Image (spheres, helix red, strand yellow):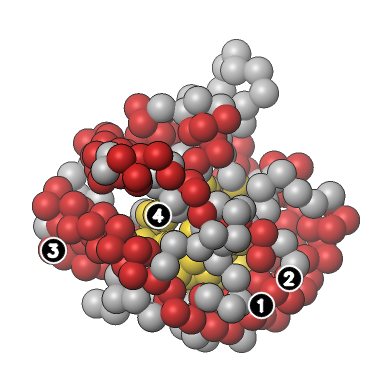
């Protein structure tokens, strides 16, 4: 089955409520026009309720950037999957490299969060990727393999490939302007798909979507998207401006 392309915006720690409202109003018509491309926007918790309310009953998928795997309790500063669902989130980023590197999230934590998101009915967008040193020293694939295996070991054997999305984001390419070459993106994402085939079979691996992230912009998206195994983009900087994000959605069509 053909995989539906996805263009996803990751706002990171940006935008006030007012800015989120303006973005929501502007992104809805772009998503309605996106024919055949899924459009997702991952917003800060403070905007999620309003952003999800404004985009409900539109093709825009409202998502969160993080959550904790317990449902409630003494976890100061955290929010849970039921809380995200309660305010209208449909998807959630898990294991973004900024969560892993700055907030010390382990492969085990990422795996637990993925399982919880799936059980709750949120679409997890599970991120993986290597540092520059890992790439240069040849340790890149060990790292990515461990990240993916930890997640797949934790989730049900009969997982529906449409309920989960992966994103390969080389850390050295995030926010640096230094995009992976289309060949490097294809190479890594092709390997991730190969690993998923080994772990879950051809049917799963052939249908699951894998995005590329790391300095995606309107100038390089077409070449990246033309790669066989690349199903879309997870975009930070170039998605903060809704017109620029709209160009990326157009290019993904
Ligand atoms: P960038 O971020 O597009 O600004 O490189 C991508 C991401 O971190 O998801």
Distance Cα–Cα, label 3 vs label 2:
37 Å
Residue at far front of view: 136
Q: Relative to the observer, which residue lies in front, 150 or 228?
A: 228
Residue appearing at x 30%, y 40% in the figure? 137
Label 3, secondary structure: give it.
Answer: helix
Residue appearing at x 73%, y 70% in the figure? 242
Give the residue number, with chain letter if any, for mark 1: 246
Q: Relative to the observer, which residue lies in front, 215 or 34?
A: 215
Answer left or right for 18 relative to 219.
right
Give the residue number, with chain letter if any, for mark 4: 168
Figure check: 225 above or below 149: below
Residue appearing at x 48%, y 81% in the figure? 222
Distance Cα–Cα, label 1 vs label 4:
22 Å
Distance Cα–Cα, label 3 vs label 4:
19 Å
Q: Quadrant of residue 209?
A: bottom left
Are the residues at dot 1 and dot 2 in contact (C-beta closer than 8 Å)?
yes
- Which class describes the residues within 10 Å of circle 4: few (<14), some (14-19), or many (20+)? many
Answer left or right for 108 relative to 121.
left
Figure check: 148 above or below 18: above
Give the residue number, with chain letter if any, for mark 3: 202
First-in-chain label (3 vs 4): 4
Distance Cα–Cα, label 1 vs label 2:
6 Å
Label 4, secondary structure: give it.
Answer: strand
Give the residue number, with chain letter if any, for mark 2: 242
Q: Mark 3 vs mark 4: give the one in front.
A: 4
First-in-chain label (3 vs 2): 3
Whether residue 117 can be seen here? no
Answer left or right for 183 relative to 205.
right
- Which class describes the residues within 10 Å of circle 2: few (<14), some (14-19), or many (20+)? some
First-in-chain label (4 vs 2): 4
Figure label count: 4
At which x and y percent is residue 197?
Answer: 15, 57
């Amino acid at each position: 089955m053909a995989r539906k392309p996805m263009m996803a915006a990751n706002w990171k720690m940006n935008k006030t409520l007012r800015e989120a409202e303006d973005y929501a109003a502007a992104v809805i018509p772009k998503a309605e026009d996106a024919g055949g491309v899924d459009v997702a926007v991952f917003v800060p918790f403070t905007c999620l309720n309003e952003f999800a309310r404004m985009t409900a009953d539109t093709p825009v998928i409202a998502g969160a950037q993080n959550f904790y795997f317990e449902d409630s309790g003494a976890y100061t500063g955290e929010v849970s999957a039921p809380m995200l669902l309660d305010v209208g989130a449909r998807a959630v980023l898990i294991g973004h490299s900024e969560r892993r590197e700055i907030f010390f999230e382990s492969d085990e934590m990422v795996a637990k969060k993925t399982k919880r998101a799936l059980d709750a009915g949120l679409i997890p967008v599970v991120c993986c990727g290597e540092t520059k040193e890992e790439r240069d020293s040849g340790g890149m694939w060990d790292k990515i393999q461990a990240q993916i295996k930890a997640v797949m070991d934790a989730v049900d054997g009969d997982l529906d490939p449409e309920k989960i999305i992966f994103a390969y984001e080389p850390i050295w390419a995030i926010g640096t302007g230094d995009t992976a070459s289309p060949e490097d993106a294809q190479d890594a994402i092709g390997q991730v798909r190969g690993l998923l085939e080994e772990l879950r079979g051809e049917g799963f691996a052939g249908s699951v979507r894998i995005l590329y992230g790391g300095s995606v912009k309107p100038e390089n998206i077409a070449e990246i998207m033309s790669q066989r195994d690349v199903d879309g983009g997870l975009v930070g900087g170039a998605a903060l401006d809704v017109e620029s994000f709209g160009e990326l959605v157009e290019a993904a069509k």
